[in-house]
Image (cartoon, rainbow, N blue to C red):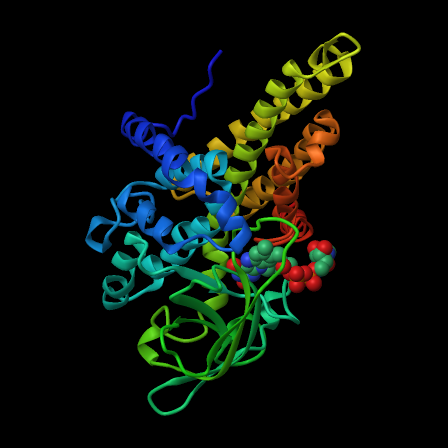
Amino acid sequence: MAYRSAWMTAELDQFRDQFRPFLEKELAPQAEKWREQKMVDRVAWRALGEMGALLPSVPEAYGGIGASFAYEAAVIEDLETIVPEMTVGVSVHSAIVAHYVLNYGSEEQKRRWLPGMAKGELIGAIAMTEPGTGSDLQNVRTTAKRQGNAYVINGQKTFITNGQLADLVIVVARTGEAGGKGLSLLVLETQGKEGFRRGRNLDKIGLNASDTSELFFENAVVPPDNLLGPEEGQGFAQLMQQLPQERLALALAAVASMERAIEITVAYTKERRAFGQPIIDFQNTGFTLAERKTEAMIARVFVDWCVERLVAGELDTVIASMAKWWCSQKQVETADECLQLHGGYGYMREYPISRIFVDARIQKIYGGTNEIMKLLIARSL
Ligand SMILES: Cc1cc2nc3c(=O)[nH]c(=O)nc-3n(C[C@H](O)[C@H](O)[C@H](O)COP(=O)(O)OP(=O)(O)OC[C@H]3O[C@@H](n4cnc5c(N)ncnc54)[C@H](O)[C@@H]3O)c2cc1C
């Protein structure tokens, strides 16, 4: 029986009928080059913008197409299936950064930044993590001190997705007292910004086409107009409100990755022969794939339900945390088992399963580690 996500619509079918061949023809052939240069070309971002694949759930008045989060979900799934090199960067830009601006920005801020982001001309990043502060977000040390008619930012961030390319960085900075209540979100426009410096494009074991950077702020001046929200001290609450969407985006990518790993492994094990038979005919191979297929189906149904909850404005932190930890855990296990069924070929870079395997691993760490997810769930019990 064919399964169809309940959030799919005829309009989304039409979009995907054009979007998938576009990804296959125009972007996928460039993926190897991007992995080598450790960065996606800007022209690919603009091409996604032209396809209407960036910021689809932002209202038309700000350059989007006024669709629901289901549209973002379809884009994330299709990228993860066809050009996984772009999934993380686009998720951060489209499903995360744009929504901070949309939900907390003033009318002027929305008109200034969102249309350029929708066209792929402005690339967004969000800088929470610091060398000394990851899971413990309330402990952020980067400061933004009000001096006359400006905020002066000092500090350092690390592991920032889109860090090399970003034109806009949402900086989580301390404007007040210790703890979460002293944090604010400030948008730093990077072009020609004195006191702002990008560090290395970090050398990762996977996600090789996604740029991940250190960022340095040494008396970087930002106008007060770039504060997100009506007043200081809202940053931590704003982060907590947006994290369910970020975590669901990660879970969606996890499910698409699992489905792809299983599909290519089924095809491979039907072709590959040992002891005179296709290896899929060994009971171990069949059972392994049966188990993984079942888990992927369970993950799919759960995540689809989460998408519906989010569209209805009802996805809470606990459910989103469940989706993030469980789907990423299953993604990593599935990638490992599927690589195993490829034998030695699975360890070769030219086989896509090898990349699915290394790219999967980070999913248990970023967007809040899976231990933090379980902490949030446990607190609700
Ligand atoms: C490729 C990549 C992209 C990233 N992109 C971004 C980005 O765009 N923006 C951004 O701000 N950050 C980004 N990050 C950072 C990421 O979100 C952090 O690495 C993550 O939140 C964990 O923080 P940490 O690395 O400091 O680990 P730590 O917080 O030091 O954690 C180390 C270990 O301790 C465990 N631990 C910590 N606290 C607890 C606890 N209370 N109970 C149980 N266990 C605990 C953790 O689960 C983990 O296993 C990215 C990271 C990577 C690698």
Task: Give the total number of marks visible in the rendering.
Answer: 0
Left or right: 168 in relation to 119: right
Residue closest to the eye, 13 or 40: 40
Query: Does residue 10 sit above or below 162 in this rendering?
Result: above
On the image, the x and y values in percent for residue 8 come to 36, 28
Q: Residue at x 74, y 29 (%)?
A: 340
Q: In which quarter of the image is residue 324?
A: top right
Left or right: 39 in relation to 364: left
Query: Does residue 107 sit above or below 359 in this rendering?
Result: below
On the image, the x and y values in percent for residue 249 come to 48, 44
Q: Quadrant of residue 251?
A: top right
Query: Does residue 106 sit above or below 348 in this rendering?
Result: below
On the image, the x and y values in percent for residue 106 come to 28, 66
Name, please, the residue furthest toward the bottom.
148
Q: Which residue is drawn at 66% across and 51% down?
A: 205
Q: Residue at x 43, y 54 (%)?
A: 96
Q: Which residue is drawn at 63% across and 23% down?
A: 265
On the image, the x and y values in percent for residue 295 come to 63, 26
Q: Quadrant of residue 62?
A: bottom left
Residue closest to the eye, 82 or 179: 82
